Image (tube, rainbow, N blue to C red):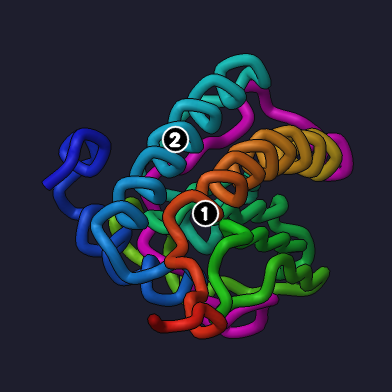
Amino acid sequence: MGEYLDQVPEEVQDHIRQITGTSGLPNTEDSVELLAQAWLEKKRAFEDKIGVLNMDEVDELGTDDERGAIAMTYSGSILSIGPLAEGKRSVEYASIGLREDVPDTATHEHSELAADVVLDEPVRFDVGPIQKSSPILKLAVMREEMEPEAEEQALSDATVAITEEFVEINKTVSRERALIEPEDDSNLDED
C-alpha cells in the first residue's frame, strides 16, 4: 500500500480503490494514492469546520430526531440533512466532484429518510435528492438547540463552507491528475 492509503481507515480503503475507477483517473496505484491524500485532507477539513461551526459529532440521527445534521461519506461527499418539519427535511448532496457516476450536487426540499442515519451505513431516502449515499464516516449536529429556520440556515452555511474547502482540494487533485495521466503517444512516429 502507499503512504496516504495506509493512513485511511481500513473500512474506507476499499471504497477509495473502487471510486478510483469512476474518477476519470487512470486505475493505478498513483491514482489511488492521490485520492487517498485528498480524502485525508477532506476529513481534516470537515473535522476542523464542524469545530469552528460549533457542531458536535454524533453516531446517529434518528428519522424522528428533529435536528438536522451534516454527514461526510466514505467517498468524501457531503450530505446536509435539514431539521425535521412536518415529516420532511431539506437535503443537499454534494459529491466529491471527481466521480463521473454521480451528480456533482443535488437538492430536494421535501426529503424523507428511509431509516436512521448511522455511522458506517449508507443514508437511504424514501424521497430525496439521491436514493442512497456511500456509508457515513462522520456525522455532526448543531451544538445549540435552534429554531428550525435558523438551524436550516446554519446547516446550509456549514455545507457551503465545507464544500468550498473540498472544491479547493479537488482543484489540487485536478492539477495532480495531469501528472499521472498517461500521455497519448498515438501521434508519435516510429522509426
| Image side of residue 124 versus residue 70, left or right | left
| Image side of residue 173 versus residue 4, left or right | right
Q: Which residue is drawn at 69% across and 67% down?
A: 104
Identity, as a three-letter code, of the amino acid under mark 2: Lys
Query: Between residues 89 and 104, which one lies in front from this camera angle?
Result: 104
How far across and down, in percent of the image, does residue 119 sit?
33, 51
Chain part drawn in magenta: 125-151
Tell me the mark number nearer the camera, choosing from 2 and 1.
1
Question: Is residue 6 located in the magenta-colored stretch of the structure?
Answer: no
Pointer 1 local density, CA inside 10 Å: few below 14, some 14–19, many at least 20:
some
Label 2: which residue?
Answer: 43
Question: Is residue 143 located in the magenta-colored stretch of the structure?
Answer: yes
Q: Which residue is drawn at 32% across and 70% down?
A: 27
Pointer 2 local density, CA inside 10 Å: few below 14, some 14–19, many at least 20:
some
How far across and down, in percent of the image, does residue 188 sit?
51, 78
Q: Is mark 2 on a helix, strand or loop?
A: helix
Identity, as a three-letter code, of the amino acid under mark 1: Arg
Residue 26 sits above or below residue 128 on the image = above
How far across and down, in percent of the image, does residue 117 sit?
44, 59
Label 1: which residue?
Answer: 177
